[in-house]
Amino acid sequence: MSLLPPQAALTRAVAGVIAHGFTVVARNTRGDSFYLKPEGCAFALRISNHARTPKQRKNHPDAIASLVIRTPQTERSVDALVEQALLNFAGARRTREAVPPTD
């Protein structure tokens, strides 16, 4: 089984999340961070090659789950990472939607 370079793995991950009904709503100029949301949802799933910075946290407080790919991955491992990120997103969404916002 061959390894995908990190950028190709990110591209596969984004496509995998899109296949589950998400749409890219934002990306950075370098093309290494993507924010995706399901239709009608206030929350986003972030896919990137690096951890979030304080500036990114400030600019995208709606990102409630992240998938970070820094190293080469097999297609199977990318697919598994996508599935786990979708589960994390669903759990975080249920938690956020169950707790009323505080002002």
Image (cartoon, rainbow, N blue to C red):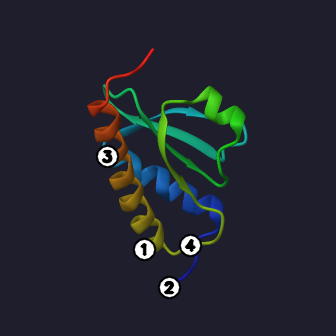
Disc on the earlier residue, 1 or 3: 1
Please name the residue that numbered disc 2 is placed on.
1
Residue at the image point whose x is 56% and y is 41% from the top: 34
Residue at the front extreme of this rendering: 102
Three-letter amino acid code at the position of disc 4: Gln
> Mark 3 highlights which residue?
90
- Residue 54 in picture, x, y percent from top left: 70, 37
Taking 39 as reference, is 59 left or right?
right
The residue under label 3 is which amino acid type? Answer: Ala
Q: Distance of mark 1 from mark 2, alpha carbons?
A: 9 Å
Q: Residue furthest bottom?
A: 1
In front: 66, or 27? Answer: 66
Please state which amino acid type lies under the numbered disc 2.
Met
Q: Secondary structure at mark 4?
A: loop
Q: Nearer the viewer, mark 1 or mark 3?
A: 3
Q: Which residue is mark 4?
A: 73
Give the answer, above or below, for where 81 lies relative to 41: below
Dots 1, 3 in contact, CB < 8 A: no
